Amino acid sequence: MSDQAISLDEVRAEIAAEVRTRRLTGDFDAAKERQLEQRFYQYAPVQGRTGALGDTLRAVDASAYVDPAVPVLSNQPAGAYLKKAMRKAGYWYIDWIATQTTRGLSTIARSLHLIDDELVELRERLDLVSVDSVPVIEEGIDQAGDPWWAAIAVGALSSTTGRALVSACGDGWLVRQLNDLGADAYGIDPRPGKILEAEIGGLDLRDDDLLDHLRSVADDRLGAAVLTGTTEAMLPAQRLQLLDRLDAVLADGATLLLHSIHPDAVSGDGIPAELDLAGVRPMRPRTWATLLAERGFVTTVDVAEAGHEFVVVAVRPR
Amino acid sequence: MKVAYVTPRYGPEIMGGAEGAARSLAEHLVADLGHEAEVFTTCAVDHLTWEDVLTPGTEVINGVTVHRFRSAEGRVPEFFSLDAELRASPQSATYEQGLEWVKVNGPVTPDLLDALEHCDADVVSFYPYLFYMTVHGVSRVSQPAVLHPAAHDEPALYLKPYADAFAMMDAFCYHTRAERRLVESVIPVAETPQIILGLGTNRAVGRGRAGTTVAGMAEGRPYVISVGRVDEQKGSIMLAEFFLEYKKRNPGPLALVFVGPVSAAIPDDPDLVVTGIVDEEDKWDLIGDALVSISPSAMESFSLVVLEAWVKGIPTMVNGTCGPTVENCERSGGGLPFDSFATFEVILRRLLDDDALRAELGERGRRYVERTFDWPVLIRRYERFLNEVIERGRTTPSAKAVRRLAGD
């Protein structure tokens, strides 16, 4: 059977739709479902840290109701009768306590839902001005062979000490070249399909977004970084965040190589769709050089023959 | 190449996931590729008490040299009160409280650490992150150190001494991307060399008996299966309750078969069958005839049993809050996650009613395992990774040295 025969995405969508329909039509016993949900979340990992607030709130809802009907099953023959008698005798009191507790917990759950509603609204507003991950721009890269700036990258990075990060590494071609020359390079790329084969083949490549990755790198630990196709579609605030993180993670003596499309090259229909969608344009080489110099880097700029692309090499003095 | 493993328990009698994985890697390095492997471990069998049960000293198990050391202390009663105190906000615990937690969690192994200092392996692998011997062992070895964290999203991961231990490692070997993302979101070690290896799967070796015969059920009775420790924390009770509710709403002959060591009271019901521990052959026969394999556990760092179902072309259902098993389902297309009784019921019914979907998911899972987790493929990737770690250790200063120079 071929992969085209059944679309798993369609199956998942159908399952989600059926669950929604059944809940709406009251097919599930709400009390029973709540009880089972409580069981489901009993040993679930800590939620919320990864944004799964909705799941956590469902767990809170499921545990907010305190049942005054104490279970009376027993392994002993007379145990069940005894427990039943005790439950009957104390029911008025337990029911009163359970009602107060449920009321209190429900108020807390309600307030958490209000906070969640506010967060959802805030998130929706933020979505209008930010993007989750930065798209990779591959315009200008000669797919048939190494791009013009590969020689500059190899020359600048082959003698660095410490790990060298290559962002938007694709199939790992530059990582492989640098490692062959004795560097200790690894790569990241937000497109898992691009890296899969090379990763299985043994290269240290990860499917990661650059900014997320840099947040998880310890300070002063990188000997070099190559950024290609990474910065063009970044929002201004993201570019500043990038510079701050690079400033933190690059060690003394480290080299940064930044390859980008020249802003003058993205006019008319030459604008890549990703840039159109991001609503930004690449920064000029002089701007990068200035911002890096402000952070103590010594910079040089190379512009490609046709002027469509450029490379900024920035070295942090020891 | 000579590889040393540091792990709290070791041996064929140990059912633990991380310790079992360490043993598999060591044995395959020796048997398949002719490398040397030695193990530094305790005399414990029970992971709750760490009581010394096995004989201290050196023995060879399946070609792997195993050095066993007595523990100075196992898990002490103070563990439970300290754990309860730190559990709510582990990030707020002091460094000293974190160290104390590591100590009272046990096993405390000073003799093992002394011996480790003198080991002559080319690389030392710590497996998993959680224990005293990892936290205190990494600073005692001069060789490159590799950590197989086997990390879960659990309070201990957020304790400060673990951040130090992770930062001193020269490389990481993760089970899944979800595990790597978790570790890197808690501890800034993303620049450290790493590999996402997973675990190798064995070839199916059944006796060709019907699964119903092995489980003691009527011939031809359809069943779904859950393989692994039958334990409340592993989600077994939840699964039993979900299944019984499913049966109430969907009457029929379908049974649920639990296979594995039992430490939870599964409700006494004719639709629930508990086999207890079975041998490998019986396990494969049971899996092979199941309609669907269900992994109810939310706390897995890999879950070999999910892959074993795919080896036999059986589709899986996994707990939707368990990152690693969900990841393997998404990457393979061989399974579906459930996150409530409602999704459990709808998915199970869909899979049982749709033979083509079951076959397709099972086949996708089978291809995924064959390409990525078949032992010959996996052990070669691991060998190349270790060789690179050793080579890097010869040419660049170790993570420990860098940290010492930086005065961290």
Image (tube, coloured by chain):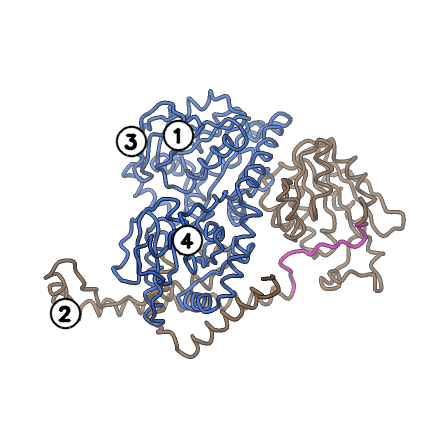
- Residue A132's place in the image compared with A15, above or below, is above
Taking the view exactly as shown, the residue that stands out farthest to the bottom is A25
Q: Of callouts 3 and 1, which one flags the residue occurring earlier in the amino acid sequence? A: 1
- Mark-to-mark CA distance, 4 and 2: 48 Å
- Find the residue positioned furthest to the right: A305
Q: Amino acid at mark 2?
A: Lys
Question: In the image, which disc is placed on residue A88?
Answer: 2
Query: Closer to the camera, B109 or B99?
Result: B109
- Chain letter for the residue marked with disc 4 in the picture: B
Amino acid type indicated by mark 1 = Thr
Marks 1 and 2, how far apart in space? 56 Å
Asked whether A20 falls inside the magenta stretch, the response is no
First in sequence, mark 3 or 4: give its number.
3
Residue denoted by label 4: B287
The amino acid pointed to by label 4 is Ile
- According to the picture, the residue beneath numbered tag 3 turns out to be B53
- Name the subunit of mark 2: A
Where does label 1 land, which residue? B41
Q: Residues within 10 Å of mark 4 (few under 14, many from 20)?
A: many
Give the drawing colour for chain B: blue
The chain to which mark 3 is attached is B
